[in-house]
Image: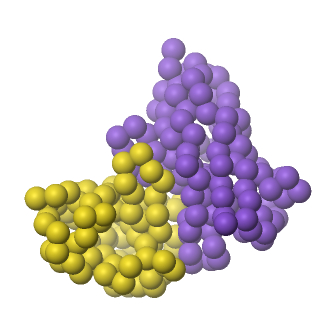
């Protein structure tokens, strides 16, 4: 199975900060990478698919990049509602695997 | 509006069984791959199983293979997860989630149903 790692595991940031989260796959997955945001007690929400495509309805301050094994999610100017946990997911093959998550909280 | 509503969770003893359901509305159910994803309390997300639109392709995580069975009834717009030989480590919120198309996984999620396995 493809293993997904994320860094950092958590970070503290302020409203307006630019935040970057990294996801790495244990083998090449082309661009088969998604990013999800989850708030406490809620289901996850798809932000980015195919590594860099913004899901409909997601604010443009969210962006994704990368291909192969290394990927990033960038939030260009944190809003109060962005404090949450972020997960990457590889859907290159089965079993689909999530990264362990990155918790973004308020500094 | 796309809606996915899970039901069937509850408290069950180790070794017991439970059947989860996911009722779908707001889209052509029979055209989409569907999935189960779970989240243990305070932990991350874990993909559990996927079933293609016509049930031709079915996949399971190693952690549930041989114990869980995914199925669907396209006439009833419903997805199921039969869980047998339950273990304490199966305790989690179980979500059903839709794939929009290949390459766009989990674009819609249900609210989740809690399964607790405890003696």
Q: Is residue B30 above or below residue B11?
A: below
User: Residue at horizontal 31%, vertical 63%?
Assistant: A81
Camera sees residue A70: no
In-front residue for pair A78/A46: A78
Image quarter in which the N terminus of chain B is found: bottom right
Compared across the picture, whether B51 is left or right of A99 comes to: right
Chain assigned yellow: A
Q: Is residue A44 above or below residue A78?
A: above
Q: Is residue B13 above or below residue B105?
A: above
Farthest right residue?
B75
Q: Is residue B91 above or below residue A67?
A: above
**Residue B74 in the image, given as x and y percentages of width and height:** 84, 58
**Residue A16 in the image, given as x and y percentages of width and height:** 17, 75
User: Residue at horizontal 57%, vertical 78%?
Assistant: B103
In-front residue for pair A13/B51: A13
In-front residue for pair B5/B103: B5
């Amino acid at each position: 199975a493809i293993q997904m790692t994320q860094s950092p595991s958590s970070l503290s940031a302020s409203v307006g900060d630019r935040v970057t989260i990294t996801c790495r796959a244990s083998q090449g997955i082309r661009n088969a990478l998604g990013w999800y945001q989850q708030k406490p007690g809620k289901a996850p929400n798809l932000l980015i698919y195919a590594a860099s495509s913004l899901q409909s309805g997601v604010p443009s301050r969210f962006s994704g990049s990368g291909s192969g094994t290394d990927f990033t999610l960038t939030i260009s100017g944190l809003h109060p509602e962005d404090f949450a946990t972020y997960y990457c997911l590889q859907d290159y093959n089965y079993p689909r695997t999530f990264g362990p998550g990155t918790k973004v909280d308020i500094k | 509006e796309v809606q996915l509503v899970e039901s069937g969770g509850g408290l069950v003893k180790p070794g017991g069984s439970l059947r989860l359901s996911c009722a779908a509305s707001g889209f052509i159910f029979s055209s989409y791959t569907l999935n189960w994803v779970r989240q243990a309390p305070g932990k991350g997300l874990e993909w559990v199983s996927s079933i293609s639109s016509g049930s031709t392709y079915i996949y399971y995580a190693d952690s549930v293979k041989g114990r869980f069975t995914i199925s669907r009834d396209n006439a009833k717009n419903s997805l199921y997860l039969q869980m047998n030989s339950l273990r304490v480590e199966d305790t989690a919120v179980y979500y059903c989630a839709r794939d929009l198309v290949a390459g766009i996984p989990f674009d819609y999620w249900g609210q989740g149903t809690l399964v607790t396995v405890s003696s």
